[in-house]
Every structure is written in C-alpha cells, then in structure tokens.
Amino acid sequence: MNRKLTWMLLVGVGMSFTQCKDSGSDVKPDDENELITSVTLKFTEQGTTNVSSFSYKDADGDGGNAATKFDTITLKPATTYTLTIELLDESKTPVDDITKEVEEESDEHLFVYTPSPASLMTYTYGDKDVNNFVIGLTGKAVTGAAGDGKLKVQLRHQPGAKNGKPEPGSDDVNLDFTLKVK
C-alpha cells in the first residue's frame, strides 16, 4: 500500500513538472478601467426640445474624496425620453472625453440602467456594437407612475468577454442616482 502511494506521488509530481512549460507567447495585461470624474445623463422629452441634465462629479474618481455633485433625477410620469450619457475625465488638461473612447471601444463596454423599483422606469437600448451587442450610450427611457426610488447606472468594462449581459467584467462606473418621478 505504501509503495502504491509513493509511486502515485512520484508520478503526480513528475507530471506537474512536465505540464508547466512556457508556451512562448507573451501574456497581455488586462485593459485598465477608465478614470471617469464626471457622468451626465441627458433626458430629452419625446416630441419636444426639452432636455433635463443630471450629473455626478468626483474630481479624483472613485474612492478618495467625496463627490462634489450628485444630482437627483426628476422626471415626469408616463413620459418617453431619449436618454444619452456623457463621460469625462476632468483630471487631465485638456479634459478627456471618455464617451468617445467608450464609443470607439464599444465592443468592450456595456451600460446597465437599473431602476428600483422597476416600475419607475423602463430602458430600451438604442445602439449596438460591431458584434450586435447593445451599448447604452443612447436609448429610450419610459417613466411609469409617480414615485421615488433609485436609478443604478453602471458602465461595465468587458474587454474580450462582452456577451450583451452585465457579467463578466468590472465597473468603470457604478452610481445610484436618486430618481423621482413626479
């Protein structure tokens, strides 16, 4: 019994050394998440030129100092809006328009809009990437009945793994706006 166990251990150790060899290909580091210091949601009421903008600003990005601006989103009940989003990195001079970068790398990014409660608003994507997966830079938001809640806005960074769903990936943006429909 001891001999069998010894032989099994030797074979296992030997196999582990022969299986661990360099394939010769360089390992590429994962794409880093973008620094986003400003997020602006623009709601354009359908059939009008009325635009309501709501912003979040945090000069040093996620962590560190607290946000200097975090607007409450206030929308009309039973109304359809075109929703667009703008992202900036204001830590650089000149300011870096991250919206353009997300658009250029749309096959690596996905916006997720989650109202809570869900009855406050529905969101329909209005754009797709080269692989026919939704992006979320623009879309249609339809409000429900009057009420208060939250709108979670996430920008999922999914290099090489985007499948049209929030997972896998990491967050470039993860904000909980207060949402008032009145």
Image (tube, rainbow, N blue to C red):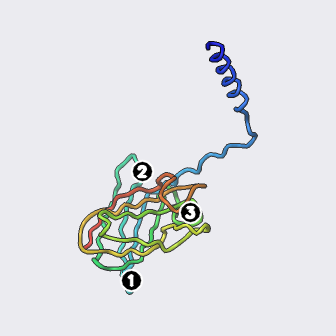
Between disc 1 and disc 2, the foreground one is 1
| Residue 74 location (% of width, % of height) | 29, 71
Residue 81 makes an appearance in the image: yes
Marks 1/2: CA–CA distance: 33 Å
**Residue to which mark 3 is pinned:** 101
| In the image: residue 20, left or right of residue 103 | right
Question: Which residue sits at x=73%, y=33%?
Answer: 21
Up-down relation of residue 58 to residue 113 (above or below): above
Q: Which mark is residue 62?
A: 2
Q: Secondary structure at mark 3?
A: helix
| Circle nearer the N terminus (1, 2) | 1
Residue 94 makes an appearance in the image: no
Instruction: Tell me the amino acid under the disc marked 1.
Output: Gln
Marks 3/2: CA–CA distance: 19 Å
Q: Secondary structure at mark 1?
A: loop
Marks 1/3: CA–CA distance: 27 Å
Instruction: Tell me the amino acid under the disc marked 2.
Output: Asp
Q: Secondary structure at mark 2?
A: loop
Between disc 1 and disc 3, the foreground one is 1
